[in-house]
Image (spheres, grey):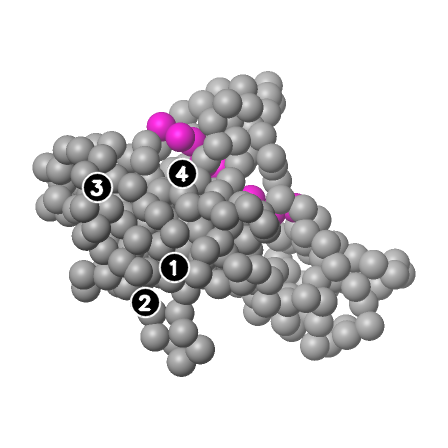
């Protein structure tokens, strides 16, 4: 049920999927993994899946400190980073269903300052703009080499420096500013858990299926020029 308790009647089916939305409609995103682990430990013969999961992410809303229900593109990306790893670490989860691929119309809805639209899509309603969360899954699943610089729409930021965060399915990536290498290589953690970063940056790696997210470096807030990240 909505509190996370398992109702006995549900065991009548051979496969099951649950829709809790921990980290959006209640609780924290970090509850998803422990809930799945507890269910699997108590009912190892039941095929468990996630029937629906996601958060709203509006490409005009941004934050250096994203929080649940702030509707920012950054919180949506953090949520999908976490859930992608949760599922990658649990091969016994039979199916997961991201809600949703695209933002879509919903006449009765008014959230995040937007009327008539559900903003949980990995892309905008016009199918033209891929949100940062879209590239989380590309980094995990695509066989084609890819690197994506996140936060490119977050133009007005507070503080003296800007964190450069990337999603990639490559072993390492390198940051260039105006054609000059300033940070690299960065990549997923070593087996010993040592994060690979650059210039004192603190990487935030998510590993699984060849994909990772990492802070590769920082630039001054007054920076103007070209950023490039290459494998």
What residue is drawn where x is 58% and y is 50%? 143
What residue is drawn where x is 53% and y is 36%? 122
Q: Nearer the viewer, mark 2 or mark 1?
A: 1
Q: Position of residue 158 (x, y in %)?
A: 16, 41
* Mark 2, residue position: 196
* Mark 1, residue position: 172
Mark 2–mark 1 CB contact (< 8 Å)? yes
The image quadrant of residue 54 is top right
Packing grade of label 3 (10 A; few <14, some 14-19, many >=20) is: few
Mark 4–mark 2 CB contact (< 8 Å)? no
Work out which residue is located at the far bottom of the displayed protein and give it. Answer: 192
* 216 on left or right of 28: left
Q: Nearer the viewer, mark 4 or mark 3?
A: 3
Q: Secondary structure at mark 2?
A: loop
* Mark 3, residue position: 179
* 184 on left or right of 199: right
* Magenta residue check for 99: no
First in sequence: mark 4 vs mark 3: 4
First in sequence: mark 3 vs mark 1: 1
Mark 3–mark 2 CB contact (< 8 Å)? no
First in sequence: mark 4 vs mark 2: 4
Q: Main secondary structure of the magenta part?
A: loop
What residue is drawn where x is 33% and y is 40%? 151
Picture layout, residue 224 above or below residue 228: above
* Mark 4, residue position: 73
First in sequence: mark 1 vs mark 4: 4
The Cα atoms of the two marked residues, 4 and 2, are separated by 25 Å
* Magenta residue check for 58: yes
First in sequence: mark 2 vs mark 1: 1
First in sequence: mark 3 vs mark 2: 3
Region of the chain picked out in magenta, as a range: 52-60
Q: Secondary structure at mark 3?
A: loop
């Amino acid at each position: 049920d909505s509190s996370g308790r398992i109702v006995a009647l549900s065991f009548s089916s051979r496969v099951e999927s649950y829709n809790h939305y921990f980290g959006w409609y209640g609780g924290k995103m970090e509850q998803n993994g422990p809930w799945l682990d507890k269910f699997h430990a108590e009912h190892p013969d039941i095929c468990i899946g996630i029937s629906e999961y996601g958060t709203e992410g509006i490409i005009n809303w941004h934050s250096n400190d994203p929080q649940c229900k702030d509707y920012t593109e950054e919180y949506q990306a953090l949520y999908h980073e976490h859930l992608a790893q949760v599922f990658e670490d649990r091969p016994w989860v039979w199916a997961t269903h991201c809600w949703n691929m695209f933002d879509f119309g919903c006449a009765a809805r008014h959230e995040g300052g937007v009327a008539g639209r559900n903003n949980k899509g990995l892309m905008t309603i016009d199918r033209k703009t891929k949100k940062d969360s879209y590239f989380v899954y590309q980094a995990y699943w695509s066989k084609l080499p890819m690197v994506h610089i996140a936060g490119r729409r977050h133009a007005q930021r507070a503080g003296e420096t800007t964190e450069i965060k990337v999603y990639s399915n490559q072993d390492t990536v390198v940051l260039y500013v105006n054609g000059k290498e300033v940070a690299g290589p960065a990549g997923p953690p070593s087996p010993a858990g040592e994060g690979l970063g650059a210039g004192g940056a603190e990487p935030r790696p998510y590993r699984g299926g060849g994909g990772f997210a990492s802070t590769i470096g920082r630039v001054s807030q007054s920076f103007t020029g070209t950023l490039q990240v290459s494998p």
